[in-house]
Amino acid sequence: MIVTRTVAKRAAAATDGFDCRRCGACCAAFRVSFYWAEAEAVGLPSTLIEQIGPWYACMAGSNGPSPHCRALQGEVGHRVSCSVYGQRPSPCRELQVGDARCSDARHRHGLPALSDATTIDLSPTSGQPVSPKR
Ligand code: SF4
Ligand code: SF4
């Protein structure tokens, strides 16, 4: 059953209960970079990592003019999942739903900022969640 709820134009209300598996924009908007040793510490597969300097690495696919993390599965703005959700690096854990980078990422994909949205589909979905980036 599709559940649609009208929400107020306050970010807190608009982001309450939003399911990132219906978005994924921040996984395909920025370079997802982190201190190189973090990859080994969290157990990220080397095939999903790109070294970008002596001290930093990034998620493969996120370092270019059209970033799209290689771990992101599905279609942005519809249904997505992260294939390494349990091992995702710190930028993915730090970005918060409804913050400025979330809004920027959604804007890049033609999606409204959650704080501006008046109607958000809150129906549940399946698969591993995604979570964002620096
Ligand atoms: S944090 Fe924001 S941009 Fe990232 S998946 Fe969730 S709603 Fe989309
Ligand atoms: S949450 Fe997963 S798919 Fe999204 S950028 Fe991080 S590692 Fe990639």
Image (tube, grey):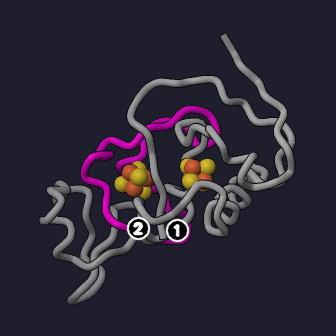
Residue 67 image point, x, y percent: 50, 63
Determine if the C-beta at disc 1 is less than 8 A from ligand 2. Answer: no
Q: Are marks 1 and 2 in contact (CB under 8 Å)?
A: yes
Q: Residue at x 13, y 65 (%)?
A: 40
Relative horizontal placement of residue 121, taking residue 71 as reference (left or right): right
Report crowding for label 2: few under 14, some 14 to 19, many 20 or more residues within 10 A (C-alpha).
Answer: some
Q: Give the residues drawn in magenta, as a range.
A: 64-90
Q: Nearer the viewer, residue 68 or 130?
A: 130
Is residue 99 visible in the rendered image? The answer is yes
Residue 47 image point, x, y percent: 20, 56
Q: Under tag 1, what secondary structure?
A: loop
For residue 67, above or below residue 2: below
For residue 52, above or below residue 127: below
Residue 102 occupies quadrant? bottom right
Q: What separation in Å lies between label 1 and label 2 (alpha carbons)? A: 10 Å
Give the quadrant of the N terminus: top right
Q: Under tag 2, what secondary structure?
A: helix
Determine if the C-beta at disc 2 is less than 8 A from ligand 2. Answer: yes
Q: Residue at x 68, y 66 (%)?
A: 104
Is residue 25 visible in the rendered image? The answer is no
The nearer-to-camera label among 1 and 2 is 2
Residue 61 occupies quadrant? bottom left
Give the amino acid at mark 2: Pro
Give the amino acid at mark 1: Phe
Q: Which mark is residue 99?
A: none
Residue 72 image point, x, y percent: 42, 46
Q: Does residue 14 belong to the magenta stretch?
A: no
Q: Which mark is residue 30?
A: 1
Q: Which residue is mark 2?
A: 91
Residue 88 image point, x, y percent: 31, 55
Report crowding for label 1: few under 14, some 14 to 19, many 20 or more residues within 10 A (C-alpha).
Answer: many
